[in-house]
Image: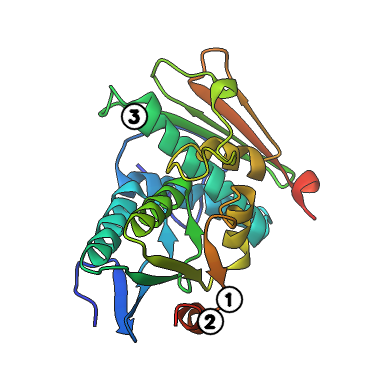
């Protein structure tokens, strides 16, 4: 279920299936809504990256044992800020326990960078206590150089 | 001309294998896995491989793509090969800087410079 590409939703809360095409369509809709709301290319790059990492983590880690379950993706886009929330049905995790992937001993490990990129590119990110829902904010005024 | 199902454009120049991506976005997992398998297969056929990966067509990548690049780096190291990255868009280069992977990879502005560094 997707909105017409000419009129992306600026406020939605959907169940997203683990299908590459569905994921791409949803990301494109959010990015188009952001571009329509006046977010510059660099902002859209940041939002796409954070969104990709959060959805990937939800399916890959959160739904490791639930491969056919959808994840919940919610967004609200105004001309001032973008709120994104991604929630899975998995057991959650402790974000603080994720080791620093840039440390010398971990630099050659091929995983563990998604959370770092989400933090780097969004104004704020916050997990719930269980660690299965992340809320991310991109604030246009704060993030614009 | 690339095969219909490949995600890479590959050419060989003076024993240096040059790889370019077909896709502008290296994001989705299946695609990344496919790219990784194709490049690892290329390395496998060479002894002391010399490889340049060009990002000239790439607008977006994800941490999963970075993971695949690290796997390629580790394989190259195991085979005493030499790996160079080239033509990385400034926005994407920033991702390498944030993750400090600009210290792990040797990155050149152009494929020509990357190839020259291997001769």
Q: Residues within 10 Å of mark 1 (few under 14, many from 20)?
A: few
Give the SS element for disc 3: loop
- The answer to which image quadrant residue B109 occupies is bottom right
Q: In the figure, A97 relative to B41: above or below?
A: above
Give the SS element for disc 2: helix
Q: Residues within 10 Å of mark 3 (few under 14, many from 20)?
A: some
* Image location (x, y in percent) of residue B35: 30, 59
Residue drawn where x is 54% and y is 27% of the image: A98
Q: As rendered, which of B40 and A115 lies closer to the eye?
A: B40
Chain of the residue that carries numbered disc 1 in the rendered image: B
For marks 3 and 2, give the one nearer the viewer.
Answer: 2
Residue B113, numbered circle: 2
* Image location (x, y in percent) of residue A134: 55, 27
Q: CA distance from mark 2 to mark 1?
A: 7 Å
Q: CA distance from mark 3 to mark 2?
A: 46 Å
Residue underneath mark 1: B109
Task: Answer with left or right where residue B23 lies relative to residue B87.
Answer: left
Residue underneath mark 3: A70
């Amino acid at each position: 279920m997707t909105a017409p590409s000419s009129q992306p939703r600026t406020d939605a809360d959907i169940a997203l299936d683990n299908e590459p095409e569905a994921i791409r369509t949803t990301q494109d809709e959010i990015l188009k809504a952001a571009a329509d709301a006046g977010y510059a290319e660099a902002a859209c790059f940041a939002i796409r990256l954070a969104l990709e990492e959060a959805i990937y983590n939800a399916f890959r880690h959160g739904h490791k044992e639930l491969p056919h379950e959808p994840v919940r993706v919610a967004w609200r886009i105004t001309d001032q800020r973008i709120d994104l929330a991604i929630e899975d049905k998995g057991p959650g995790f402790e974000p603080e326990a994720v080791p620093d992937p840039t440390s010398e001993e971990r630099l050659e490990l091929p995983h563990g960078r998604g959370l770092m990129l989400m933090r780097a590119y969004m104004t704020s990110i916050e997990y719930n206590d269980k660690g299965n829902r992340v809320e991310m904010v991109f604030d246009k005024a704060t993030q614009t150089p | 001309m690339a095969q219909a199902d490949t995600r890479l454009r590959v050419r060989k120049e003076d024993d240096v294998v040059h790889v370019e991506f077909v896709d502008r976005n290296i994001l989705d997992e299946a695609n990344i896995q496919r790219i990784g398998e194709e490049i690892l297969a290329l390395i496998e056929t060479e002894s002391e491989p010399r490889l340049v990966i060009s990002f000239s067509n790439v607008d977006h990548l994800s941490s999963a793509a970075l993971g695949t690049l690290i796997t390629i780096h580790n394989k190259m190291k195991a085979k005493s090969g030499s790996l160079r990255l080239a033509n990385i868009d400034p926005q994407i280069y920033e991702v390498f800087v944030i993750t400090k992977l600009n210290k792990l990879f040797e990155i050149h502005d152009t494929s020509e410079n990357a190839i020259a560094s291997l001769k």
